């Protein structure tokens, strides 16, 4: 048999895994973490829920695979844009743009639901922390470039500030569910942008 021949068994398995992951993403988006049971995911995807355990071992491992799928979709865009940031105003403007994209696609809603799930499933905490670390490192790099060459470079707690920015990015999605004003998100980022401009002015004055 030629080594170039098709490998239907592996291909079918990959397609099945992708189908299960997409069903998990859709379930998280529409029903939240509380509704993301094996039965609900199987029903949404039109497959036997036993396939979840066959391919992933557990629902939690499937949820982690769903996070990996989202990360692979967005990581390169975030990296390309954040690596070019050299000011607080740019960082805020980019954050607003990316948050709007991820909100409209449902990515932020899904990630916030999985993070919420870690409160009742402690076994998710360590693997989620590992998966979110590359994102906070991207923000850390942007902040380091922003404060480089200023008197604040040696005193700004970059890791803590990056954590705050990441938490704010995720938290806005949760709190917006309580708001009736659909334009509140834009207003929030506009206010944060104003604060960034003021801070840039202070840093410039201190470096003069």
Image (spheres, helix red, strand yellow):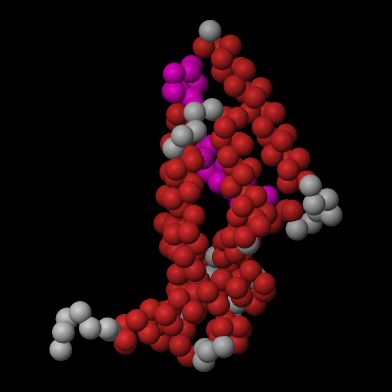
Magenta span: predominant SS is: helix
In the displayed orientation, state which residue is furthest to the right.
Answer: 180
Name the foreground residue: 202 vs 127: 202
Residue at the (48%, 49%) spot, across then down: 77
Locate residue 35: give its quadrant.
bottom right
Residue at the (48%, 16%) spot, across then down: 151
Q: Position of residue 60 (x, y in %)?
A: 49, 74
Vertical relation: 60 (above or below) 1: above
Residue at the (79%, 56%) spot, across then down: 178
Vertical relation: 21 (above or below) 118: below
In the displayed orientation, state which residue is furthest to the top.
Answer: 208
Is residue 156 inside the magenta stretch? yes
Is residue 26 inside the magenta stretch? no
Name the foreground residue: 60 vs 146: 146
Q: Is residue 36 visible?
A: yes
Q: Position of residue 115 (x, y in %)?
A: 57, 61
Q: In the rendered view, does 200 fall on the left or right side of 74?
A: right
Residue at the (55%, 77%) spot, across then down: 23
Name the foreground residue: 30 vs 38: 30
Which image quadrant: the N terminus? bottom left
Q: Is residue 156 visible?
A: no
Q: Position of residue 45 (x, y in %)?
A: 56, 83
Vertical relation: 17 (above or below) 111: below
Q: Which residues are magenta?
A: 146-172
* Count of numbered marks: 0
Locate residue 154: give its quadrant.
top left
Q: Position of residue 180 (x, y in %)?
A: 84, 54
């Amino acid at each position: 048999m030629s080594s170039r021949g098709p490998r239907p068994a592996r291909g079918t398995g990959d397609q099945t895994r992708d189908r299960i992951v997409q069903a998990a993403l859709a379930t998280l988006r529409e029903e939240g973490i509380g509704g993301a049971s094996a039965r609900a995911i199987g029903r949404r995807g039109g497959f036997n829920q036993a396939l979840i355990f066959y391919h992933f071992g557990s629902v939690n491992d499937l949820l982690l695979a769903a996070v990996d799928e989202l990360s692979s979709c967005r990581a390169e865009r975030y990296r390309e844009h954040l690596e070019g940031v050299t000011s607080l105003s740019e960082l805020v403007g980019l954050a607003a743009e990316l948050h709007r994209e991820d909100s409209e696609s449902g990515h932020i809603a899904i990630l916030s639901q999985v993070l919420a799930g870690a409160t009742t499933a402690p076994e998710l905490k360590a693997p989620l922390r590992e998966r979110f670390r590359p994102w906070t490192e991207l923000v850390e790099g942007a902040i380091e470039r922003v404060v480089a060459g200023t008197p604040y470079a040696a005193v700004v707690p970059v890791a803590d500030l990056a954590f705050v920015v990441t938490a704010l990015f995720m938290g806005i999605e949760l709190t917006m569910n309580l708001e009736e004003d659909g334009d509140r998100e834009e207003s929030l980022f506009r206010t944060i942008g104003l604060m960034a401009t003021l801070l840039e002015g202070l840093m410039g004055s201190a470096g003069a």
